[in-house]
Image: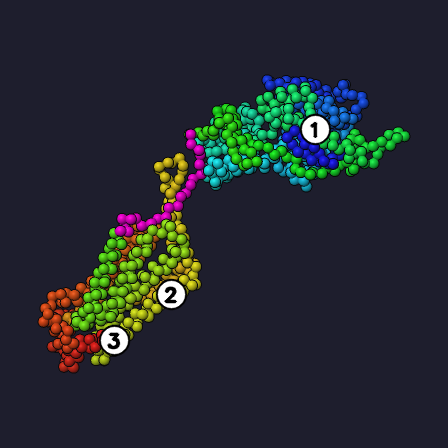
Amino acid sequence: MRIPKSIGAVIPLLACLSSSILISAFSTPSPSTSAPTSTSTSSALAESMTISKIPIYVGGFFPIEGHWAHELLPRTVQTAIDHVNELPGILDDYELRMRWNWTMGSPANALRLLHDFVSSGPPVLMTWGPMFSSVATVVNEIAPEYNIVQVVTAGSSTLNDRTRYPLTVRISGDEDLLNPARTAFIKAMGWTRVAIIFEDTDYFRERHDARVIFAGFLPDQALIVFCKIFQQGLYGSKFVWIIPGWFESGWWRNPDPEIVPCTSEEMEMMLQYHIGFDGDQFVSDVEEISFNGVKPLPHHLEYLRALHEMDDNSRDIYAYDNLITMALILNSSIADVEQLPGYSDGDKLRPTRLDDFTYSDTDMDKVEIEREGIRNSPVNVEQFIGSTVFRILNYSDKNGTLHSVENRSIRWADGKRPVDGITYQPIDETVSSTVRIIFYSLSGVGIVLSLIFFSLNVHYREYRTIKISSPTLNNLIVFGCLMLYAAIIIPGLDKSSYSEPKIVVLCHVQTGLISVGISLSLGALFGKTYRIHAIFKKAVERLQKINLPDSKLILGVFALVFADISIIMFRVVLDDVHVTSHCLDAQLDMTDPRQEIYFEPTVRMCESTNQIFFLIIMFGIKGILVMFGIFLAWETRDVAVSDLNDSKYIAFSVYTVAVTLAVAVPTSYLFMYQVDRRFIIFSCAVLFANTTVLCLVFVPKIRPLCSCTLGNRDMMKKTETSSARPKSSSHSFHFHSADDGVKKLMEELVKVIDGNVK
């Protein structure tokens, strides 16, 4: 059987129902818009009951006796019962009555009342209430054992669980139906982070920097928690508290000081500007009310108008609507109940009636839910300002938008909308423009200087001064220095808009430029030193012929380059090089501190799982190369042949490179995350070492070229050379004191070197 609509609710059910206990009849006073009036009750049935009608009973779980918000409920429910009994077309053959008592908001009292219903007195077919979710979730799990259908206004979504609550019908708005309105409001405020708090405020304070907070409490719990929140200072212009909008008016006033150690004024201070969401459950025009086609009588409409005009009327409207819903359910059940096996009434067999129900009657205990009996209505957004709750916005699920109510706007403590928390805005740390320009310019000067030296080296390669210094190896030194100068450009780039793959590629390119550049420049430099060392050690001391042409030395340099390229390629293929962002200390944006925007400097660096192994290999090779160069420079320190001035300058170059690397490498790691300083250290090291090497290698050869005349240029171009005559010193070779064989070999030394260069 299909159950019709009640006021503002859809309750489609098939029901044959149950239950009963303490009998009370009520007078039917008119509602008042002023202070609530008392309700008269008795323990007997109403004397005015029509004899021809069959009495049937429903049960009532009323909340708290003596509470100002609940004292009108019994009268309102009895008025609804009287209206049902007066309306034609609803339970025409029956007289609806109620057995009820107060539960005082206690599940234990509610269970005791349920026991009274089932153990004595006429059975109740259905129950009204409980109103509190904490009570309903307990009682409604037990009531189905006695085939009792419960129609409740409790708001807990837990009651939708048909496994635990198969006979529970909710006519109040579901809390979940408020979520679209909450979501729309959060989006409209521009918030992206919210928190939900239930009980543990200490954990909440310590672990979360939440500013927009949904509080999921019942009023009694809310008083305790909000007092703790007040004591911890989690209120004011930085915080937005969002609580259920159905809390009773003035629920925070006069808390029990033994439970809540805060005054009403302190609670009011804490709750300032909080937001509430509540469903707009009530019709705006009572003339539209129809009970499944049955229109209320004129004096019923007068009562309903007065009920709508009452202050804080939601509980009484729900109570009235709840009872009407129960009557419509019972009325729709009559035809189905009559289809059940008949009852013997003396000599006659009559159809089954509603009053034939017993708690063990399995033929009348089925409830079929065709659709969820939940209201779907507009949602009000309310704000607490001063000591009053104002309806600010209205949300309609039809178009999913928020609309202002009476042109009201949301107000905030300091006039500005609170932010949803600290916002950390990453800012890529890049080399400052001034530093970049300075070192790019110096690098450009170095590149130009390298190209000048390269041009001179090529143009005068047949001149004796250039030729004897191995121009091909000099060219490799220049190329290596050019690569190192170019390596300054990459770390100075502004990579804030670069993608991660592009940054990874640049990292590999920079590694290649530095590694190959060092191998070319130092490899060629040390190659020349090694040849001088070999000549003097073997040719002079052991009287052996040396064959070290440029081709062999160049092959050694390219072997170093090949090793570098192989290591880099292995890393590209085998290692997972990625970009890691390292966040530095955040700084508050002082242009608008209230927005709590912190600029967080971020340094993006290339890292990988096996990075340490590749660095060890790379630094190991370069370290061995430098140590080898230092060894050669030390071994050739006493060579003082004028045509072999390379030996002395090469030694200076080696020492310069070694000292620079020893200082720059650890210092750059010390300033790993200070972009400007690290770039300055790296650039200064490259510029100083590169420029020093270039000048020491080429300047001594340029001076003779510039100072010579055209005549002695011809002399310089001759391939023949006279014997070297160095100055006598304690660190020089004294040709006149050597025996004839050594003297002759020394006279031919330059020729040997000249021949090896070819």
Mark linked to residue 230: none
Which of pointers 1 and 2 lies earlier in the amino acid sequence? 1
Residue at 41% x, 62% y: name it.
572
Residue 249 lies, in percent from the top left, at 56, 25
Disc 3 marks a residue whose amino acid type is Pro
Q: Is residue 425 magenta?
A: yes
Which of pointers 1 and 3 lies earlier in the amino acid sequence? 1
The residue tagged 1 is 293
- What's the CA distance linking mark 1 and mark 2? 88 Å
Element under label 2? helix
Element under label 1? loop
In front of the other: label 1 or label 3? Answer: 1
Mark linked to residue 567: 2
Residue at 69% x, 30% y: name it.
292
Element under label 3? loop
The residue tagged 3 is 549
In this view, the residue in front, 711 or 417, is 711
The answer to whether marks 1 and 3 mark residues whose Cβ atoms lie closer than 8 Å is no
Residue at 62% x, 20% y: name it.
306
Can you name the residue that lies furthest to the right here? 347
Disc 2 marks a residue whose amino acid type is Ile
Residue at 90% x, 30% y: name it.
347
Identify whether 184 is placed above or below 427: above
Please state the extent of the stretch shown in magenta in the rendering. Answer: 415-437
In front of the other: label 1 or label 2? Answer: 1
Which of pointers 3 and 2 lies earlier in the amino acid sequence? 3
Horizontal arrangement in the rendering, residue 254 relative to residue 359 (left or right): left
Q: Quadrant of the C terminus?
A: bottom left
Residue 411 lies, in percent from the top left, at 46, 29
Quadrant position of residue 153: top right
